[in-house]
Image (spheres, grey):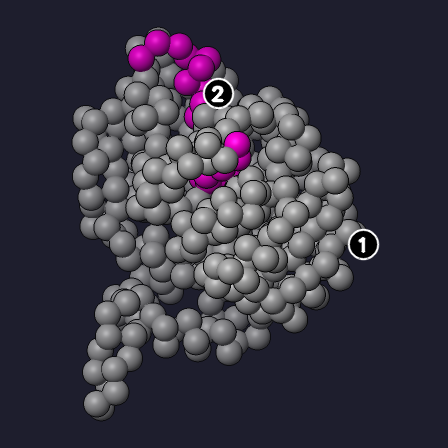
Amino acid sequence: MSTVAVIGAAGIIGPAIVATLAEHDAVDEIRCLDRDGDGARAVAKRHGGGRARAAALDITDHDAAVAALQGSTLLLNTAAYRINLAAMEVALEAGAHYLDLGGLYHVTREQVKLDLRFREAGLLAVLGMGSTPGKTNVMAAHAVAGLGGRVDRVVVAAAGRDPDPPSGPLVAPYAMETILDELSMPTPVVRDGEHVFLEPLTDAGTVEFGEPVGAAPTIYTIHSEQATFTDSFGARDVSFQLSLNPVFLDKIRLLTDLGLAGTDQVDVRGTPVVPRQLLLALLARLPKASPSHEAFGIHRVEVYGEHGTAVIECVTRSVDRLEFGGGVLSTACPPAVVADMICRGEIDRHGVFPSEQVVPFHALFERLERYGVTVRGAV
């Protein structure tokens, strides 16, 4: 019997992960866990297919989390990347495999240091298995293998659009705090084998994404791929380029320019206030709104090596049977599919691995087709 515990089940991506898991026969039980217990129970009831149960849980409460995870085959962490290390410690003690959506570079570099402990425990941890990091990592591995020989440069680009956005002052395509970090933290790129840091929101030029986005401006942002691609592929130049909806990006630029993404305290009439905490608290008071069913995501990977160039693109649109837009499904379906692979024993490895090292390209994308995912390009 396979049990998957979903941490952050009541978030933006969690409900779609639960709905996708519920379509896989290898997953007998889904545990929907979130600090918002009522939200987790609502997700279990609505999306769990009769196989889910829910509870309130703070994964950073180690002892309580270990108790809640007992008997779980896999801990699927969809919560904020800041708790990744705490979640991995829980998985180790509970004897569960581990899977997450990425560690935003710095946390990823710490996570891989747990490799020996996972190997000794006979457990597998797959890092960064959402859309990007995730699908893009597996696409890059496929392109690198197809080219053969030395790889010099890997460029990952992502774009998301919503033709019918819901009303609201700031509807985020994924976790708002992660977006604030991506657009306010120094941005790592690998250049000539060295990790260097650019200013946030540095212009990365125009990328031709093809249909349905076309040519779009991008910015460099901090991401997990820059932390692992050099070791995985030997690439000496690695970057991640993001194209957000221009209207949404302009709003985020204003917030960051005003200092509202800041994490250092400021004095307000004698009271210390952390601007970001205030911003997130105010956003939490707004009516909950998610991207529309018409939203979609598109990802592009370019690999340059001694034997030529490979370009692979992936587009994710919504599917009629699921209520989520393509942008959310783009992130939610890959970890659910890989969780199913792990439960089936199809990925039989022990240790900590970035997704590009262990997830098979053809098996992944064949199963993702039913979730509105199409791949184009050639190696």
Q: CA distance from mark 2 to mark 1?
A: 37 Å
Looking at the rendered structure, the kind of residue marked 1 is Gly
**Viewer-closest of 185 and 325:** 185
* Residue at 30% over, 21% down: 234
Q: Residue 122: where, in percent of width, then height?
A: 52, 32
Res. 223 in view: no
- Which residue occupies the foreground of this view, 81 or 218? 81
Q: Judge whether 350 appears above or below 316 on screen.
A: above
Rendered-image quadrant of the N terminus: top right
Q: Earlier in the sequence, mark 2 or mark 1?
A: 1
The image position of residue 297, as x and y in percent, is: 53, 43
Q: How many marks?
A: 2
Label pair 2/1, CB-CB below 8 angstroms: no
Residue 142, numbered label: 2
- The magenta-colored residue range is 122-150
Q: Amino acid at mark 2?
A: His
**As rendered, which of 150 and 82 lies closer to the eye?**
82
Measured as percent of width and height from the top left, residue 169 is found at 47, 71
Q: Residues within 10 Å of mark 1 (few under 14, many from 20)?
A: few
Which residue shows up at 40% across the image and 61% down it? Answer: 177
| Front of the two marks 2 and 1 | 1
From the viewer's perspective, tell me whether residue 200 is left or right of residue 341: left
Residue under circle 1? 50
The crowd level at tag 2 (other Cα within 10 Å; few <14, some 14-19, many 20+) is some
The residue drawn where x is 34% and y is 70% is 276
Residue 148: x and y in percent read 40, 10
Classify residue 337 as left or right of residue 91.
Answer: right
The quarter of the picture where residue 303 lies is top left
Q: Can you see residue 233?
A: yes
